[in-house]
Every structure is written in C-alpha cells, then in structure tokens.
Image (cartoon, rainbow, N blue to C red):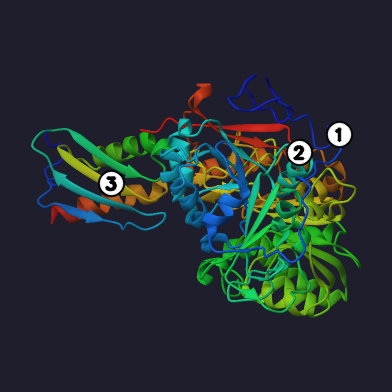
Amino acid sequence: MQLNKDCILKNTATAGFEEKNDILITVEASNNDDITVDLTSSVLRQYGRHMKELITATVKEAGFTGIKVTAIDKGAWDYTIKARVLAALERGMK
Amino acid sequence: MINAAGRDIPEQIKGIKDIKLYKGEFAYTPSTVKAGKKIRVGIPHTDKILENIDASIEKIGLKDGQTISFHHHLRNGDYVMKMVVERIAAKGIKDITIASSSLSPCHDFLINYIENGTVTALESSGLRGELGKYLTKNPQALKKPVIIRSHGGRARAIEAGELHIDAAFMAVPACDHLGNATGRKGKSAFGSMGYAMIDSAYADNVVLITDNLMEDPVYPYSIPQTDVDYIVKVDEIGDPAGIASGAIRMTKSPTQLLLAKYAAEIMEQTGVLKEGFSMQMGSGGASLAVAKFIREKMEKQQITGSFGIGGITGIFADMLKDGLFKAAYDTQTFDTAAIESIKENPNHIEISASFYANPWNAGPIVNNLDTVILSATEVDLDFNVNAITDSNGICMGASGGHSDTAAGAALTLIVVPLVRGRLPMIRDHVQNVVTPGDSVDVIITDRGIAINPKRKDLVEKLQGSSLPICTIEELQKIAYEFVGKPEEVELSSDDKDIVAVIEYRDGSIIDVIRKPILD
C-alpha cells in the first residue's frame, strides 16, 4: 500500500560515498511491501541494530513502502544516514 | 578473581604458572636475585663467523620446546625472524616459543609456522596485523595464551628469570669479526639497540645476524663481543623502507593539534613546564605534536629542560640540538632524522630497555619523568587505558612503554579524540586494560578535559582555568549525544578462548584478552 502517491521509486538510486564517516545508500523498489535493509558497517556490532531501525524508520516516514536498501557504512553519524537515505529516495523518484 | 583494576582473572590459565593478580602500581617487592646466562669459555683464535643460519642452529643445538628471541628495532622491515624460523622449521624443530620485543605486520608469516607446529607460543609487546586477527579468532592455535608485556616488563621478566631465552637471534646493522655490534652504521642502521642489549646479556646463546660485517673494530658498541657466540652474514637484514620512516612529520589534523595544544597548556598551568623539567612524548600524532607547542612556550619563557626519553624522533632530536633539552635517553630510534642524531650528538644517549623502564632495578629513567603524553585506543570512566585491542576486541596494538611511563611520570596525560569514526572513545569499561587508571592523571579530548578525581592537587591547580575542564562522565555524555551509546561486543567466557594475558610491568596480571564472538 502506497501512503503517498508521489512516493513511488521509479529507478534504483544511490546517495553518499564509501568514505570515512559517510554511508553509501542504494535504494531499489522491491516486489513486495516490505522495507528491507542490507547493512555492511565498520561499527556493525556497536550500532548495527540502531542503524537498521533508523534507515527503516526514515524510509517509512518519507512515505515509502516496498523498498530494498543496501547500505555500506564507514561510521556515519545519524544525521548523515538520514540525509543519504532521503537523498537516494528523492533521486529514485525522478 | 577480581584484580585491583577491576578485571576478572581466571584462577587457572593454561600454561601460566603462579598467577599473580595486579594489586596496584608498586605492590610487589621481589626477594630473588637476578638471573644469569650460561657461562661460556671463548677459545683463543677461533672464528665466530658461521656460513649460514643453519650452522648457527646446529652449533647452539636448538631443541624442541626451547625459547628464541628477537628484537623489533627493524620494525615492519624485519627480515631476520622469517629467515631464522624458516630454517628452524626446515630442520623439523617443533614447539618453539618466540619471545620478540614486539611483532609487526611483517611477522604475519608466523601464522604458517603456528599452523604446522613449529611455533607454539608467543611473548611480545605488540600483536597486530593479520597475525593479531588470526590469533584473536583462533586462540587455541597456540598451546597457551600470548603473553603481552610492556617494554620495562619484558626487561624485568628476563632479568628476573621469568623469561628465559635459550637463543637470541639478533639482527645487527654493523658488527666486527669478534661480535661488537652497533645500530648506528650500515645500510640497515636503526639507531639505538635498547631491546637487543637485554637479550644479548641474558640469553644462553647469542647469534648476531648482520648485512654489514666490518673489518675494523666497531666502537662504540651496543652489544659487546663478550656476549656473542656466533655471527652469520646475510645479504639484507631488513627493508630500509620498513625499518625507519623518513623524518616523522608534524600532524596537520586540527583535532590532533588541538589535543596537543591542550596538553601543553596543562603542562604550563600545573607548573610542570619549568627549568630542568623532563618529558616523554609518545609517537602518535597528537602526543608528538605537543613538541610544537612546548617548543614555543620554552623559547618564549627561556626554559631549558633536563631530558627527554624515547622512542626518540627527529622532532625531539631537533629540540635537543637546539639546546632546549640537555639529554635524550633513547631505547628505540624512530626515524631517519633521529638515527642521524644518535650518530652525531653526544647528548643523544642510547639506553637499554631495563635502564628505560624496568621496575625492578634501582633506577629506571621513567621514574624521573615529570610528564608523559600518551595516546590510547580507548579509555574508560575509571581512567583505565587500552592500547592493545580495538573496539571490536581484535588485537591491533602494543603495550609498549605505556604503563611504564605512566607509572613513572608525575603527570600522565592521555590524548584521545572523543569519537573515532562513530565510536565513542570513553567507554564504561575498556575492552582491555594496559595501563591502570591508578597511573593516569588527565584525559584530554577535543571536546573537553577530565582530571582523575584522585588527583585533588591537579583539580585544585586547574580550578578557574580557561581550559574546558569537566568530569569524565560529562565527556562520555557529550559523545553519546553525538553518536548514541554503542552496544557491547560479546566475548567468549570459555577459558580456552583466552587470546592473551596482559602482564603489568611487575609481572602481575592486569587483564586477559578474550575472544570476541564475531559473526
């Protein structure tokens, strides 16, 4: 179920870089309504759970469902993660 | 059993006899006498020079189960350990303990010889690289945990007979035909031979391995001919690029420079920075950068220091040359500029690891330090410092002179960024303790400075200071506001999964490194 008609991912899109303190986010439409997160991170053990929750919540709050997120993290802080997720989604809508 | 650093130490650890718990910095008083080496009789007009390493192994009669030692003055450029271990393995000798003053990534080859049973135990200051990862993940690959010692602790263990070396294979950049050796000459020159001096003096057999066998007598020498049994000439003892970096340059990182500036300010405001003071700077970016700010203050206030200790770098050698200090005591020379200095400047003095930091002699020079500035892989609310494992519990560092200088110095400053990547550096409890909070006076971060509450005198002196002083708990809170509280890494509680035992400098056990449960 689409919450917002504008929130449709037309293309696979990315935002961010594989650099220290940054995260490379790739979003693609999936064939079901779930939001899934595939996370690789240098701080997976310390923050993995938190980061997955944050990414899922950010996608949901932006009004999307049925998104597969692939994230390659190098120690990004929360505001960066959020910004990269939103940027990837916005790029994917165009 | 809980020790005085609050760490839980098992009652029995495989391969470790007489477990002594850490009880405080100077809790143990030895009542034994020094160990000695096997007496040898040199026969007049015999030649010490052997054809190759095989011949030296045969001559000394190396057997299964014995302990051989190496020094780490060649750092990540060392070829000698590999040369020797390869020949030992080729002869089918097994169950060897390697007691090296430290290990670098160039020693990753040991994994193969651990797997084939040639090497079954390690004793070292550092454990890093692929070898560090491998042993953290496979602690049972060795017959007992790795013993991690500080530089002073290793000298103590050798002199006290706790670490008995059957054969020392010492790489030397220059020696004469009788075995007088120095680190100052030759294409592989590395400067001070501080660690090698102890091994040569106490090992039952001493083999020098050199790429520079000199016809003329070598003088001054760091290893005397009276300790040397055999000499083997090889093409190269090491890779010059790995032995010494070019002159270590001052960091440009604003965070590191800020930490250094705070450290220099604290030295000034607590009254340490005065005529005749002494100091040691660690080789990390921030601790080394303290030199920049101290130099400015010394020149402005016309202060001359007494001595510096190292780990000497070109940066300190320059201060010595410029007359800002009277002497530099050097166990390990860090860069090419400092190697030039020890060759030329008579005030740049070579010292052994025992002179440097052995707590069980009448006067290690660390005891006279006014200040030491040290880095850390992480610290905790009790001011304990980790320098050996990373935040995932993987061995990637070294004990070095950390706990030695921290115990000796009147003012111990730790410089560490508040957050590295996303990881807060002030933990509830460090992953592993190398230096106890008992020895740590001030923790300096880029967001604030915490004084150990036990140092009431410092708290008082810095009251009203313009420096951002706060409690360690407040600092932790700032970090958590930025990045959140990290989850703990889960460790195996199985005593078979003890990767390493961290000895305090007096030989007591301050901590054990347990295998992290990784995915």
Which residue is painted at 20% across and 36% down in the image?
Answer: A35
- Asked if labels 2 and 3 share a chain, the reply is no
Give the residue pinned by disc 3.
A71
- Decide: is B61 above or below B257: above
Which residue is painted at 69% across and 22% down in the image?
Answer: B2
**Amino acid marked by disc 3:** Ala
> Which label number is shown at residue B161?
2
Task: Say how many tags the image has.
Answer: 3
Dot 3: chain letter = A
**Amino acid marked by disc 1:** Thr
Is the N terminus of chain B in the top left, top right, bottom left or bottom right quadrant? Answer: top right
- Decide: is B330 above or below B189: above
Dot 1: chain letter = B
Mark 2 or mark 3, whichever is nearer to me: 2
Q: Using the numbered discs, state the Cα–Cα distance from disc 2 to disc 3 in whole angstroms.
A: 54 Å
Percent of width and height locating residue B486: 48, 36
Mark 1 or mark 3, whichever is nearer to me: 1
SS category of the residue bearing label 3: strand
Q: Horizontally, is B399 left or right of B365 in the view? A: left
Judge the density around disc 3: few (<14), some (14-19), many (≥20) Cα neighbours within 10 Å. Answer: many
Q: Horizontally, is B257 left or right of B88 in the view? A: right
Give the residue pinned by disc 1.
B32
Percent of width and height locating residue A31: 8, 37
Q: Nearer the viewer, residue B294 or B174?
A: B174
Percent of width and height locating residue B492: 48, 25
* Tag 1 and tag 2, C-beta contact below 8 Å: yes
